[in-house]
Amino acid sequence: MALRTDLSKPVAATQNRTDTKPVNTVKPQGPVGMSSQSSFSAGAPSKAKATVALNGVGQKLTPGPVDLSSPQAQQAVQQTVAYVNQKNPQLTGITGGTSFSPRSVERDQLGMTHVRMDRMHEGVKVAGEQVIGHLDAKGQFDSLTGDVSSIPVGIGKAPTKLNAKDALAVAQKDFNGATSKAPTAEKVIVKGKDGQYHAAFHVTLTDTSVSTGKDPRSMNYFIDANTGESLKQYNTISHLDRTTNAKRAEGTPTTPTKPTTPTTPTTPGSAGRVADDQTMYSGKVDIQTTKNKDGTFSLDDKTRGKGIVTYDAKNAENASGTTGFTDKNDVWGEKTDPSRAATAVDAHYGAEMTYDFYKEVLGRDSIDGKGEKLVSYVHTDVNLVNAFWDGEKMQYGDGDGKDSGPLTTLDIAGHEITHGLTERTAGLEYEGESGGLNESFSDIMGTGVEWFASQKNKAVKFDWAVGEDAWTPKNGDSTDALRYMNDPTSDGYSIDNYKDFAKNPEVHGSSGIANNAFFLLTEGGKNKTSGIEVKDGIGMDKSLKIFGRALTTYMTPQTNFSQARAATIKAATDLYGKDSTEAKKVAEAWTAVGVTK
């Protein structure tokens, strides 16, 4: 098998499209917002203290997604577009130029409102380009995220030599295989590697089935609508080949340091319950289940959001169906229980802890902010050394017993589900700098889930390694892992400083840059490559809140490392104040890893 594990995030761009009509059409003569090196326009930062926003009649406004058709959302959209025009008086408002199609409006726990909009040009979506307007708790415009450069007139409305069917044929030839989902083809405008805008078709071809020598794929192709050339393409379900992982297994990692834990999350709804369910990796826990009509219990948690459910993939190459796991007495993991249910208990617990982590630490109701149901499948394929988010659900392999055990550890579960969170929010494109950030934020939040669970469960051991509990189970090295956030270079593959990005732009390798920035922010220490020290970290709780807010609120599909620095500083400013220690430490951490502006 040509892979070890798959810490991935598939993006189906067309699934996230909105039918809301573009608003306030304008013709750009220059950038909207600030340059790509500074994603935020001028605006006073909000106060650190949490505020509860009120509507016009003094009623409290609940944090979370706002219906796009509501008066509150429409007003926020219009304020965002008005701000763009105010700061860019050269925009003429000529119909057929640039417009913005609202994708989402969300209100956060500080009372701020955030309007995410896709850029359109002459009625055609501009792939990967978004602006986000930010309103403070009083409804005043605070700042703008995003950069919009000039696009040639006519590129969106001019006739093209190819149509969607032609582009699909070009992509299918490269894909060279069957698909498990219906292909999609959408006309877009895209900036190519030549720096120029092109009329193109965004084609997605997905096959989530797995087998020996075959990886799951969700390929995004951008086919030039006139030449048929592939302008760019990337697979949003990632994998690491055996050569890369061999380097990881041969690494000599440093021992992870002890974490700082400034606050202890509360345990929801646990009064009177007993932790009597035995997991493989997390000791005894208390999982939520559902009692069936026949008196048995199923791994179906109806207490969190719209539900958390765990199914058996029955070793199929593509997980499907609703074959569940049952237990007679609701005490899972007993010696007399079917061995097949063992991994399911860990996957179920991992999804529950990830949901609780999002809710209690990030203030978010599941990956979509609206309680989206979290579905997991265990026993995908036979001896599969892989786990991945396929755009709709989790799929976990059992491992081969040598390279890995079952890939159902807390940090892997949190990592993969966070790919779903990223897909529903920032949509970080899975290539280049945005791809490295995509992987890093999954590592960060997956590690956050492990930390969060360790506050509730003494059997969970938090450290700065990724996937260590499942990795190479028989080699006797408990510190062997996929990646190491405290010292990314110790795996023999990853980089820890932006100056080395050109040497390893692969998304897993470059994830070490932001991973180490997060570690230094949390605990302090030195970046190995630069030697720059960050003294006195701010602790896990604050670091996670800052990075989580940056991801969901201040990042767009094409955010790069420089913009990620700006996003996290802005998030820290929102939460703790402009001149706060937290905001200063965020800047210091990024500087240490070579991201200086």
Image: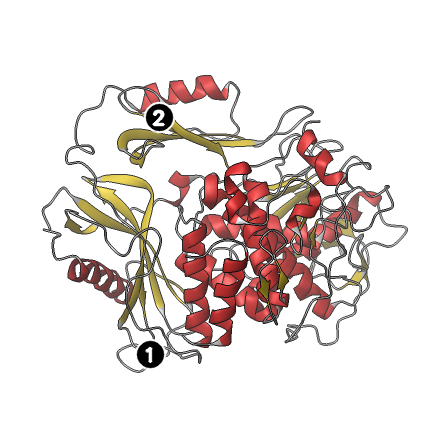
Q: Answer with mark 2 or mark 1, whichever residue precedes in sequence.
A: 1
Residue 294 percent coordinates (x, y): 74, 53
Horizontal side of residue 245 vs 180, given as left or right? right
Measuring 14% from the left and 46% from the top, which residue is drawn there?
27
Quadrant in which the N terminus is drawn: top right
Structural distance between the alpha carbons of marks 2 and 1: 47 Å
- Amino acid carrying mark 1 in the image: Leu
Q: Which residue appears at 84% of the width and 45% of the height?
A: 338
Say what secondary structure mark 1 lies in: loop
Q: Please name the residue shown 68% across and 60% down the image.
A: 450
Question: Farthest residue in the right direction?
Answer: 335
Choose between 429 and 321: the one closer to the eye. 429
Residue 316 is labelled as none
Using the rendered image of the protein, determine whether residue 314 is visible from the camera's viewpoint: no
What x and y, as percent, mark residue 453?
69, 64
Q: Residue at x 81, y 52 (%)?
A: 280
Q: What residue does disc 1 label?
A: 54
The type of residue carrying mark 2 is: Ile
Element on which disc 2 rests: strand
Q: Which residue is under mark 2? A: 223
Q: Is residue 228 above or below residue 309?
A: above
Q: Examine the rendering and report whether any part of residue 157 can be seen.
A: yes
Give the x, y percent position of residue 425.
Answer: 44, 53
Residue 24's spot in the image, x, y percent? 16, 53
Say which quadrant the C terminus sits in.
bottom left
